[in-house]
Structures are given as C-alpha cells and as structure tokens.
Image (spheres, rainbow, N blue to C red):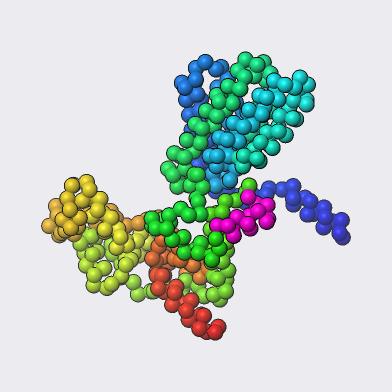
Amino acid sequence: MQIRQYLGHMWRGLGPAISGVPPAEIARASCGALLGLGLVGVMIPFLDPRLGLFMIAPFGASAVLLFGVPNAPLAQPWAAVVGNTVSALVGVAVCLSVEDPTMRVGLAVALALVAMMVTRSVHPPGGAVAMTAALNPDVIRESGFFFALSPVALGTAVLVAGAMIYAPLTKRHYPFRQFDDPNERGTQDPPAIERLGLSEDDLTAILQQYRQSLNLGVEDLARLIGAAEMQAAGQRSGPMTAKDIMSRDLITVGPEMRVGRVADLFRKHGFTTLPVIDKSGQYLGVIFQIHLIRRAREDALRLNRRFGAAMQRLLTPRRPEPVRARHIMATTLPQVDPDTRLGTLLPILGDGGYDAVPVVAEGRLVGIVARNDLIAALARESLRKG
C-alpha cells in the first residue's frame, strides 16, 4: 500500500506544476515575446553594426520570463540585465582560459551561477549565456569581453525596456510592485487587503525561511496573504449568498436616458450607483457618480473650459447632441449570480475598487449588492456568532 501511495505521489509530481493559463494571458505573453525579440533584432544591428552575432538563443529564454511571468523575481530588470551580463563575463573568461570543451561548458555555467547569486541577479537564461560563450571559442576570441556588452547586455536591456512598455499596455506590472509603492488611489497607505500588521522585513524573513525569495516578491506575498485572509473570512461568514443580502427594488435607467436625468436620480435617491437595463430587463452596464465627474473633466480639458462650466454643459437639457447613459456606463464591471457566496463578494467590494456589484440571472438584472449591504450582513453575522 505504501509503495502504491509513493508511486502515485511520484506520478503526480511528474505532471504539470502550474495551473491552467487563460487564453487571453497566453496571447498577451506570446505577443509580448514576439514584439520584444523583434525589437532586439531591429535595435542591436542599428546600435552596434560592427558585431555579427546579434541574436543569441538565451534571449528567447529571457523573453519567456519577462513577458510570460513578469511578476517573478527572476524576471526583474536587475536580474535580467546584470544576471546575463555577469554570466557573459564569466563565460568569456572561462572560454579564453580552458581548452577542454566539456570542462569549459560545465565550469562556465557553474561559475556563472555563483556570480549571479553573489550579485543577487539570478536569471536562469544567464546559464545559457555562459554556455553560449563556452561553446563558441572562435567568436569569443574575436570579440573578447566585448561580447558581454553586445549582444548580451545591450540585447537584454532592449528586452527589458520592451517589457516595461508592454506590461502597462496589457494591464500587468513590470517591474513588479514594491512594498512601499503608492496604492491605486495615489496615496501611501497600503491597499486594505494588504494591511496585515507585517513589515517588509517580516515578509522578507518569511520568504527566506521557506526559501521562496527567488519565486515571489515581498509585495506579491502581502497580496497573497491578504487574499487568503479575505477568502477565509468569507468562508466563515456562513452560507449567505448574494440573493440573501441584495437590494431587489432597484432604480434603473435606460441606455438612451440623458445624463442630466441620471444626475437628477442620483440627487433624488442618494445612490452612488445606477444600473442600466434595456426594455426587456437585460443588464447592460452600471453608472457610478464618478462617471459623470470624469466625463465633465474630460470635456473641460478637451474644450479648455472650467470644470463647473463643463459639468453644466454636460447636464443641460438644451444640448443639441445630449450625452446619454450608454455613453458613460461601465460595461466591464464584475457581476455575480444570486447564489454567489459572500466569500466571493468580499474581495470585489472590499478592495476591488467597486461600490456595488450587479446580480444577474440569465442576462437579466435581479438585484444589486452594495458595499453597505455587505458590511451590514457581516456585522449581523458577527453579532449572531458572538
């Protein structure tokens, strides 16, 4: 029985170790690698036409890390540029001093790993850089230590620059988040989900204790701990679902309603959110008060007007081409079904940047859960258990 369990465990260990990757992320990463390597191919000959070896195989491995797993510590700019460069220097030095090919390759990779660890720049493609130098003695004798500058350092720097431009365009972070970065609202307070009572040194010590410093950054560890705590809190909230706490008697607007009328409804009812539905009750989107403010601000900048004048122009019923609800509503807001557990709602409303979540069944809006609904439900549950 123990042998069977051992073999079963070993068999599972040989299987995939990562979860499935969504198609959108696959497309994002592969397109980034294509663009990054294309940029290297274009830039290096332009910047350094004297050297014939422009593209080297390790650049492909670096592209996989920079564009495929941009949050990994091994993919960060220092690790990529310094790791590849010191590995190239080591590879050249070994290539010029060791004659035996087998010894030359093994020694180059081993010493490159030492150099990367000492300089805190471990980047797996660096081993391939050192091996590339060791396997090409003719090229290395011709280029010498200049090989470390071009193509290695220069090409890696171009890849890193490409990744830094590409990441925000595809809603990713590169370089990865720092522990003391401003939050999404531009203030220095950590996001609510990351207020753990642990300092950066505490989190660093955890990573070192479990030997995960090469796999995870401090900020990402804080986010994971916070998300796990939020999920655990949701599991402790009992069997309540969205349908138990949602508002059902909703004030809604149609897609063709003028924004002036939308503003009147906000003022009359004191809401911060208004769902948009069509005549059949199908859910189309949501309007937040901030959408009116943003649109007025955009008009003020575009027309070179003061904000107050732009807001008045936006809301006036005499405007010849009125702005309507469909022009400002958000259509990508997360939505849930009536049976969604509170554990799922917590991260969305707790720190997801949303004041309310629409509850949709078969495309029709059946309710809405606002942040105050969730707070009230959690408070009741806490009092009941207390």
Q: Is residue 10 visible?
A: yes
Q: How many circles with numbers are drawn on the protein? A: 0
Q: Is residue 202 magenta?
A: yes
Q: Is residue 262 magenta?
A: no
The N terminus lies in quadrant: bottom right
In this view, 53 is above or below 68? above
The magenta segment is 200-213
For the residue pair 311 and 281, the one nearer the viewer reads as 311
Q: Position of residue 50 (x, y in %)?
A: 52, 15
For the residue pair 84 and 226, the one nearer the viewer reads as 84
Residue located at (68% from left, 48% from top): 16
Quadrant in the rendering for residue 108: top right
For the residue pair 39 and 126, the one nearer the viewer reads as 126
Q: Position of residue 354 (x, y in %)?
A: 40, 62
Residue located at (75% from left, 30% from top): 106
Residue located at (74% from left, 30% from top): 107
Q: Is residue 366 visible?
A: no
Our reading of the magenta stretch's main secondary structure is helix
Residue located at (58% from left, 46% from top): 72
